Amino acid sequence: MNTSVRIDSETVNYLIGKVSNKLMVSREMVLPFVDFTDFMEALLRLLDNRDGRRLVAAGHVTPDVAMAADRAHLDLKETLAVSPFTGDPDRTLEEISTGREIIYVANPNRVTGANYSLADLEMLARAVPEGTLMVDEHYYDFYGISGLPLLERHANIIVIRSLTTSFGIRSDESGYVVASKDIINALKEAYSWDRISRMTYKILSTCLMNYEAMETRLKLLHDESLRIALGLNRLKIQNRLTATDFLLLRVADPVRVGNYLASSRVQVENLDGYPELKNYIRYDIQSELSNDIMINAFKRMPEAYYRMDNLDKRFIKMRKPGQGKKTETGAETDMTVFDRGRIEIREKETVEKV
């Protein structure tokens, strides 16, 4: 049975209309895409129209971004702060020399959950007047701060969002881009929808309209993340909350921990291969039952696998109103708590210190 359907202009216009109405932007500023990696490659090829242009990433990048840059034959430079868990635009600005660079910012970061303020994003946009600032808002619904308001003042900003992340559909990489009319018109020539499955189209249409289901899931993730963190703290396992759908855990032996959890059918990602993330693993928050299986697996696990003898104390910049100083924090005392995916972000100490 043929499960594919050719996407005609009427179908695309329907999806564009839904997105533009939701964001209250012009229809000419929106373009949907099916596959993130393929779209990023097309976008980077389009933007790389000057000699010597580079892609500068603010923070860690996921493999799909690195792959797209490689396919587009662009040099990629990751800029990392002293602490990988907070955004530091100053570090990125050190790599800007011509003003024609392409800056990529995942906000929050898709590896560490580090985030940037609206003022940080505008600072980066101003640094590349002849370049481009790409803001990947994959986890926007969890965080709430967007670069969209800056589009009125800066035509060099491109905002990229997922259509399905808020619903926990990790197998789908579809989304949409919001940018100036000129950029969107150029993108329509460089990238176009071809075929998608009927099921994918149904999922996308449902995700655009089902706000209640999204809010319910965001609240569930919020409550579960706090509950999991408390359970891990009681086991003296260092962990970080993020404004995303995952937790970061700092353990003594990520390989042994990962293998032990896998024997209990608990999947985690070893982040040891990322710069500055030695001893860290990532756990995607799931249902209450699945989360309990993970916590119980740690209870049975030999303590030597996960117990750390020291804290992760790296200086981070706190960009609060009227403040510009650095603050020293430990892994289990510097935890960002998000409030149902909204803009409120506050620092909170864990209930029990390790």
Image (cartoon, rainbow, N blue to C red):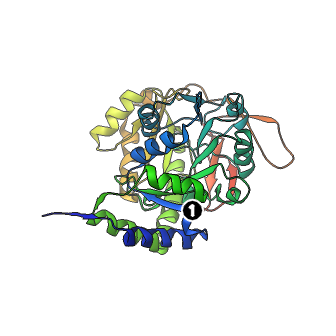
Residue under the point 83% across and 39% down: 324
**Residue 265: x %, y % from top left:** 29, 44
Q: Note whether 40 is above or below 220 in the view shown.
A: above
| Residue 154 vertical placement versus 49 (above, below) | below
The reply, left or right, for residue 258 in relation to residue 175 is left
Can you see residue 166? yes
The quarter of the rendered structure image containing the N terminus is bottom left
From the top left corner, tell me how far across and down residue 274 is, in percent. 49, 29
Instruction: Find numbered disc 1 in the image and state the secondary structure of the residue it sits on.
Output: helix
- Taking depth in this image into account, of 135 and 319 the one nearest to the observer is 135
Return the residue nearer the eye: 171 or 258: 171
Residue sitting farthest toward the left: 1
Rendered position, 210 above or below 102: below
Residue at 38% x, 50% y is 35
Amino acid residing under circle 1: Met
Image mark count: 1
Residue 114 horizontal side relative to residue 64, left or right: right
Residue 213 showing in the rendered view: no
3 sits left or right of 137 in the view: left
Using the rendered view, name the quadrant where residue 112 is placed: top right
Where residue 92 sits: x, y (%)?
67, 33
The crowding category of the residue bearing disc 1, from other C-alpha atoms within 10 Å (few below 14, some 14 to 19, many at least 20), is some
The residue at which mark 1 appears reads as 29
* Residue 56: x %, y % from top left: 60, 33
Q: What is the quadrant of the C terminus in the image?
A: top right
| The one of 214 and 188 positioned closer to us in this rendering | 188
